[in-house]
Structures are given as structure tokens and as C-alpha cells.
Image (tube, rainbow, N blue to C red):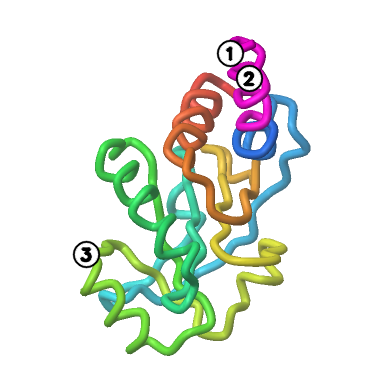
Amino acid sequence: MDVLAIAVIAFVAWKWFVAPRAFDRASKAFEAPHVTYKQLDGGTFALTAHRGRVVFLDFWASWCEPCRLSLPLAEGYAKAHPEVDVVPVNVGEPRIAAATYAKAHDLRGVVLDPQYVSQGYFAIEGLPTMVVIDPQGRIRATWAGFNPLLAANMENARKTLTAGG
């Protein structure tokens, strides 16, 4: 009976957390838009400048409770994997709100989208949203909502996309 219960729990966890975040190598990838954003540190972020690397665009807002849970997971992954670019994109907020939150939580490399134009560019339907871009500049996945297994999903994407995905 315990084995059956464990199997059911494992299936439900896979169904709700892993399967929606997975993607196959032959996904319907399409070119990411050639967006540029102002960076919190004063520079400019151009997505096309990151070709040749796996990029995770992590869309968030300081008022979003699921974002507050998700950001440390993405940041932890970024620190452990310098071979990928994890870019926290603050959306829909004034610079001061993003700066205050970023400083309090030691977020690095924050880019700003105060008008939330990313919503149209990346078909964002809610926050947090992670957009996965392969080294060729194609969108390979979009993950919406909080996922406690985010780092595992990011690692799966990195391995898949750097293996010729």
C-alpha cells in the first residue's frame, strides 16, 4: 500500500511540477524578439548580445508573492551556473521599486521594463514567468507560475540546449 501511495504522489508531482516545465528537442522554437532594456545599473541589456548562450529571462515584480519565492531559486541557479545567463526582468514598476527590492535581496543584473512591453513580446500571462532562450536565440519554453523545482527545470533546459537541442 505504501508503494502505491508513493507512486501516486510521485506521479502527481511529476504531472504538476515537471511535465509542464519540460520541453523536447524538437519543440516549436521560434526566434526571440530583438528586445533591449535599461539595466538597473544604468547600462543597456540587448538580448541579441547573448547569442551563443542559454538565457533565462525571469520576469517578476516586487509586489508578486510567488515571484518573491521564485527569485532566490533562479538567483541560486545563476550563481552556481555562470555558463548561462539568468536575467531578472522587473516588469510594470517604477525604477525605485525595482531598485529597492533588488538592493534588499541582493539581485544582480536586473533589467527594467516599467511599461511591461515584455507582456506582448513574450506572451506573458502572469508572474513569475521564466522564458528559456537557446544559444541560437530561439524561445524554447515559457514557464509561468511558482515552481519549487525551478532549479531542476533550469538544469534540464541547460543540459538539453547545450547538447545540441
SS at circle 3 = loop
N-terminal of the pair, mark 3 or mark 2, is 2
N-terminal of the pair, mark 1 or mark 3, is 1
The kind of secondary structure the magenta stretch mainly shows is helix
SS at circle 1 = helix
Is mark 1 in CB contact (under 8 Å) with mark 3?
A: no
C-alpha separation, residue under disc 1 versus residue under disc 2: 5 Å
Residue extending farthest to the front is 1
Residue at image point 50% right, 69% down: 36
Q: Which mark is residue 5?
A: 2
Callout 1: few (<14), some (14-19), or many (20+) C-alpha neighbours within 10 Å? few
Q: Quadrant of the C terminus?
A: top right
Residue at image point 35% right, 67% down: 110
Q: Amino acid at mark 2?
A: Ala
Front disc: 3 or 2: 2
* Residue underneath mark 1: 2
Residue 6 magenta-highlighted: yes
Residue at image point 57% right, 58% down: 129
Residue at image point 50% right, 77% down: 113
C-alpha separation, residue under disc 3 versus residue under disc 2: 41 Å
17 sits to left or right of 123? left
Give the residues drawn in magenta, as a range: 1-14
Quadrant housing residue 24: top right
Q: Which mark is residue 106?
A: 3
SS at circle 2 = helix
Q: Amino acid at mark 1?
A: Asp
Residue 74, position in %: x, y? 39, 49
Quadrant housing residue 94: bottom left
Is residue 1 shown above or below 89? above
Is residue 28 shown above or below 156? below
36 sits to left or right of 68? right
Q: Amino acid at mark 3?
A: Asp
